[in-house]
Amino acid sequence: MRKSSVRIARENTKIDWAIRDLVIKASINILEATDSPNEVHKFISYIVRKIYEDKEHVLATWELKKLFEKAGAIVTVGDVRSKLGDLLVFGVGRFYVVEVKPTPPPWGGMNPAEYHLYHNILMNTVVYCWREDGRWYWCPLEKVKFNPEKRRLEVEEKYDIATLLSLFRG
């Protein structure tokens, strides 16, 4: 009988216990600081939402990785929590840093910070890819603009992912 990945992960890392221990400790710290069960509820809701968003991001990154590989690219998954690319995609004479977004634009949060970093060091190699209505789209960094009033990134033009994937086909 084949073990499930969840069972293997639990046996090898006990990660679910580690996460639960951190949540319990943080909840107690919040109660000690605020004496407010409502603050604990807000914290837990926030953590659950962030874990769900991270899961969606990881799944989208993995799906896009497979699409690039199928097109003939060599793909390395970066640290999806970092500010320098989710995927590094290599082909003959080509290299892209790929920012994967599981949702369509506009994007806020930490995205403006990484955008400014890309503009300073990697302008011609960064592409943004995202899923919208069940399809993948992309655009080069120069078609992504920062809106300072809204503190969001907005896309001027989008392209079907097939046009980017075709660059890696022999």
Image: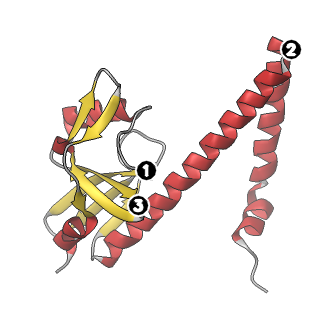
Q: How is the image coloured?
A: secondary structure
Vertically, is 85 above or below 120?
Answer: below
Amino acid on which the number 3 mark rests in the picture: Asp
For the N terminus, the quadrant is: bottom right
Which label lies toward us, 1 or 3? Answer: 3
Instruction: Find numbered disc 1 in the image and state the secondary structure of the residue it sits on.
Output: loop
Which label lies toward us, 3 or 2? Answer: 3
Vertically, is 94 above or below 82?
Answer: below
Quarter of the view holding residue 131: bottom left
The x, y position of residue 154, in whole percent, is 28, 38
Name the residue at 22% across, 52% down.
139
Residue at the disc numbered 2:
35
The x, y position of residue 2, in whole percent, is 75, 83
The x, y position of residue 30, in whole percent, is 79, 20
Amino acid on which the number 1 mark rests in the picture: Thr
Name the residue at 56% across, 47% down.
53
Residue at the disc numbered 3:
133
Few, some or many C-alpha atoms within 10 Å of disc 2 (few <14, some 14-19, many ≥20)? few
Quarter of the view holding residue 8: bottom right
Q: Is residue 161 left or right of residue 34?
A: left
Instruction: Find numbered disc 2 in the image and state the secondary structure of the residue it sits on.
Output: loop
Of marks 1 and 2, which one's residue comes earlier in the chain?
2
Q: CA distance from mark 1 to mark 2?
A: 37 Å
Amino acid on which the number 2 mark rests in the picture: Asp
Q: CA distance from mark 1 to mark 3?
A: 9 Å
Residue at the disc numbered 1:
103
